[in-house]
Image (cartoon, grey):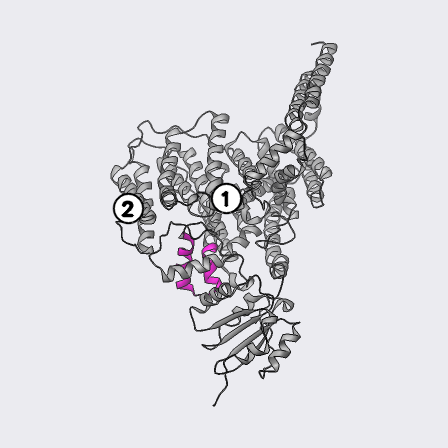
Amino acid sequence: MQLSRRWALFFTAFALGFALLLAAPGGLGKLVFGPLLLLLLGALAWLWLRPLLPPIVKALQRVPVRVWALAALLAFAESAIAFQSRPPFAGAIGWLLLAAGCAWSALWLQKSPPPGALEPTPAPPLLPPLALRPRWLPLLLGVGGMLLTAEINGVATFFLPPVHANLQFALLCASFALLVWGLSGKTSRVPLPAQETTPRAVWGALLAITLLALLLRASAPGETIRTLVDEIHFMVGILDLRFEPEIRLLSPMSDISPFTWLYPYWQAGLVAVFGHDLTGFRLVSAFLGTANVLALYALTEALFGRKTALLAALLLAVFPPHVHYSRLALIQIADPLAGTLLLAFFARGLRSGKNGEFALAGLALGLTQYFYEAGRLFFPALLAFWSLGLLVTRRKLPWRGLLITLFAGALVAFPIYYTLFVQKLPLTGRYDASGVGASYWEQLFDALITGGDIGYHIARTITPLLVYINRADPSLYYAGRTALILPLLLPFFLAGVAWALWRWRQAGALLLIGWVLGTSAGNSLLVEYAVSSRYTVVFPALALLLAAGVIFALDTAALWLKPARMRLLTPLLIGGLCLLQVWYYFGPHLALYQVQSRPAADAHDAVLRSLNFPPGTNIHIIGNVAAFTDDYLRDFLWFLSDGRDLALFALYPEEVTAVYLQNLPRRVDHAFFVQPDDTATLNRIVQVFALSSAQLTPYRATPLDRAYVLYYVPAATGD
């Protein structure tokens, strides 16, 4: 094509596209014809500049790979610094694009991956020539168990008597095991290739990482956070299970908490062993969080190899948001475990072609429906995206294995949806309450048609991405002043994202892209789209992207340094990043969190200080208790005291009148918790009771200016 013809075609296309852009309705034209015009101009620019590419490529090839890689790391660091400012992020995005370009140039020019680089995904083998037949007896027994479980919880026919929760759980576990056993198929006589054994050193490293993860999560979680963080629902759930042991485990807990009773059922078991305190109450989350570390190792090992898997597991073990949610009694921490297990078993099935792996993936797929609604909606969609992406990029899928996964998942999830259907309950109770609703889509449609302001809608799309790198949690779930990823780790995360985008045709990279973008897209459909509790599903992916970025940095250093120095740098870098995150969470973050989580005097601290009072003591918590009803604090006290005879009253200062005080019984002890600056209430109490000296909180976790002052009055003696 001659130069004049190229220019003529270029300007003709530009004029046509610009005319369409002007003629279309305002908002719709910007949203639809704007990108189309950019794509058209880009395609024409490609045709026009294509003859100039060979000399450009030759010029790029003259630059050593190590220069491109080092330039990428420096640009990623500059971008991370720029992202700590307020929007707009023009400079940060510019540095990010430059860094990505340098990183992609290094990856493109690199003829062979250096030692320790992320290993490509093994291609899925063909299934054995003789397809494994199901074990029909255990399969049918498992199906029968799931149907019976559904009937126990749905109670549609009313012929079943109430069943104890322990028996329901045993039936559920037995049905799971029978389903997996049956779908795994009979042992094939076809000789399969011998599998590589895992070295003892890897097992030792994994054990050390697991113990570290458990230590960080299970070491006195009730002492560092001595307040409830939206955990009262599960505390009440434990009490309900205690007084109603035949409760239907798979029915929704309440309208506010439309989840199954499985999580509080586990809590009730551990509380019975470890005691009615905050530590025993939160141990289930600690164990689930630790198991998530192992699940991420299994997923990463199937996709990228053992070295990357160990690094990803280590980074998740010390990842501050994951540690935090593993130290709270919140059901959200169960979502990433079930989802990661689903992806891990499916990835292992892609490698081995074994029906058993796909059956376990199906079990995990069904279990995603048993916990928080984020995992219930997100992980099935992510599996569908990943399967479609594998089909498009690799044109080969083990269809038998995929069908086994879907069949097992449907069977495991069936009791949940059967119960909801029979009881005529909404399928997505949490989203119905917290989603944007139909009015949002009407406003967006009107803005597009009439040319109105769509900036708000664009912000809703972008902000969920900033939660990872710039925006702090606006809620009290995690709070703090940083995004989910600490600023010093952000260059590694951005490098990991650039690597995933470059390798998007690989199964692992494709999964990570869908995992992160899908989480952000899903949260953009919620009213409160930046709350960290809705992002727990993506924590494993963030740790894996961090691992990819660290490996990119180490590979870059290996191009500049001698092996002896690399053997010193590698543990220093990885150990330093881990120590930084542990220090940050247990140091600055928790210190700030103690203040942020107590906007006023802390009634939780007052309840915790009341546990050793004699039976019959009347506890008066006097202050701004609008956030805490009597029932809330009484449930808290009842759980912690294991039902001891203590009476609690939450009062505003104006309710503590002289008449109220004079009518209090004198034959019981009284504990008055007064705000530090409330001298008026204290003077009214002094006029009626002879008070002992003021008692301050003995717990360092509670700031003194946020703690009630205790005045204890023993019961009167004599006549």
Whole-percent x, y for residue 547 in the image = 57, 42
Q: The magenta stretch spans which residues?
A: 262-286
Of all residues, the one furthest to the bottom in this rendering is 719
Give the labeled residue for mark 2: 157
- In the rendered view, tell whether residue 705 sits above or below residue 207: below
Give the labeled residue for mark 1: 432
The residue carrying pointer 1 sits among few (fewer than 14), some (14 to 19) or many (20 or more) residues within 10 Å by Cα, namely few
Q: Nearer the viewer, residue 660 or 602?
A: 660
Spatial separation of the CA atoms under disc 2 and disc 1: 29 Å
36 to the left or right of 620: right
Q: Nearer the viewer, residue 553 or 196?
A: 553
Q: Main secondary structure of the magenta part?
A: helix
Residue 274 belongs to the span the image colors magenta: yes
Q: Nearer the viewer, residue 552 or 468?
A: 468
Q: Quadrant of residue 447?
A: top right
Asked whether the viewer can see residue 57, the reply is: no
Whole-percent x, y for residue 247 in the image = 35, 55
Ranked by sequence position, the earlier of labels 2 and 1 is: 2
